[in-house]
Image: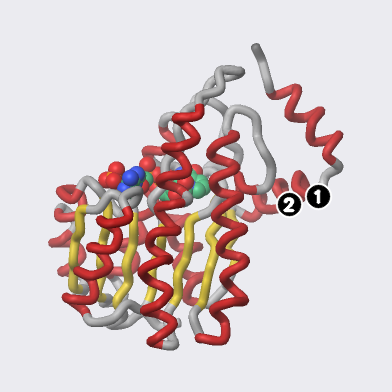
């Protein structure tokens, strides 16, 4: 895939992986549409993006609000007249506590991680289908493989994203629309800076974004990394349920 001069939309571009992706795509001389609630952080990237020779549109949008998402896609079309690719990356990882079940954390998590993607797909898919070209990459996680203790809402939101994207792949293939899922392990960003548990194979965000970028370029449909965590979670996924449960039980310290 060649990104030169292409219209690329990125959600959650104000921080972490999304911000780094924005700067990486800017080097390709794209027409970039950056989306997040903290629009001032998006605007702060303008000089750097334009110095690389890319055009920039920043949009303040809460991805949990269907009307704001619709408006954001409308503004993109108004400015650039088409959309070639979207990376739906906005996400939250809200701390849960042992044995204190709180449905509001589930609602907030699914609102951003799952419906933040669903609402964009609702607007983007008809456009890409009509164009008969383009891609949508959704941000899942290697945490989609199992229900890890104290991360139930996060894991289930990412499993839902993976499943949704997988089902769309075949449906949109005849329209030449590529559906891609991205599954990082632990990446050093403001999201993981809050974690107080060990994060094996924690990767720098620049390295992570290079892996994502290079695999998008190669048109890979499923992007899992770092490879050590991909192997480990692949093993956990295939493990008999009773074995996984023993590992999970050991993980829970009351
Ligand atoms: N870091 C990791 O280890 C890791 C691993 C696997 C998957 N991921 C996934 O990668 C994605 C990016 O995470 P990150 O680590 O880069 O985290 P981050 O630095 O906390 O960035 C999260 C981004 O999501 C945006 N966001 C959150 N709520 C939003 C909302 N309601 N509307 C619009 N945008 C919203 C934030 O923008 P505003 O606050 O400005 O709106 C921010 O730009 C997430 O989907 C995450 O689940 C991360």
Work out which quarter of the rendered image holds the C terminus and state it: top right
Element marked by disc 2: helix
Q: Which residue is mark 2?
A: 234
Element marked by disc 1: helix
Q: Residue at x 55, y 36 (%)?
A: 153
Q: Which residue is mark 1?
A: 238
Other residues around mark 1 within 10 Å, as few (<14) / some (14–19) / many (≥20): few
Q: What colour-coding does the image apply?
A: secondary structure
Q: Return the residue nearer the eye: 118 or 45.
A: 118
Give the numbered dot on residue 189: none
Q: Return the residue nearer the eye: 125 or 158.
A: 125
Work out which quarter of the rendered image holds the N terminus and state it: bottom left
Q: Are marks 2 and 1 in contact (CB under 8 Å)?
A: yes
The reply to whether residue 187 is visible in this rendering is no
Percent coordinates x, y for residue 16 in the rendering: 36, 47
How far apart are the alpha carbons under marks 2 and 1? 6 Å
| Image height of 239 relative to 168, above or below | above
Q: Residue at x 35, y 48 (%)?
A: 64
Asked whether, in this view, residue 241 is left or right of residue 151, the answer is: right
| Image quadrant where residue 6 sits | bottom left
Percent coordinates x, y for residue 19 in the rendering: 31, 54
Asked whether, in this view, residue 89 is left or right of residue 229, the answer is: left
């Amino acid at each position: 895939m060649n990104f030169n001069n292409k219209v690329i939309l990125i959600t959650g571009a104000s921080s972490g992986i999304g911000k780094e992706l924005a700067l990486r795509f800017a080097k390709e001389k794209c027409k970039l549409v950056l989306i997040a609630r903290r629009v001032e952080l998006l605007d702060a990237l303008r000089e750097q993006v334009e110095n690389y020779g890319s055009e920039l549109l920043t949009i303040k949008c809460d991805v949990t609000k269907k009307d704001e998402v619709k408006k954001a896609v409308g503004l993109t079309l108004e400015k650039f007249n088409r959309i070639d690719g979207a990376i739906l990356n906005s996400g939250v990882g809200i701390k849960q506590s042992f044995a204190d079940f709180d449905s509001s954390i589930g609602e907030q998590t699914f609102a951003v991680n799952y419906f933040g993607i669903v609402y964009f797909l609702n607007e983007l898919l008809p456009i890409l289908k009509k164009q008969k070209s383009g891609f949508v990459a959704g941000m899942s996680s290697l945490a989609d493989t199992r229900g890890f203790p104290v991360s139930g809402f996060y894991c289930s939101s990412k499993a839902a994203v993976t499943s949704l994207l997988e089902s769309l792949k075949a449906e949109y293939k005849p329209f030449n629309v590529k559906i891609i899922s991205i599954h990082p392990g632990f990446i050093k960003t403001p999201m993981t800076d809050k974690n107080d548990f060990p994060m094996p194979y924690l990767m720098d965000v620049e390295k992570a974004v290079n892996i994502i970028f290079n695999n998008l370029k190669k048109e890979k449909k499923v992007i899992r990394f770092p490879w050590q965590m991909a192997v480990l979670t692949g093993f956990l996924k295939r493990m008999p349920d009773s074995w996984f449960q023993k590992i999970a039980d050991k993980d829970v310290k009351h």
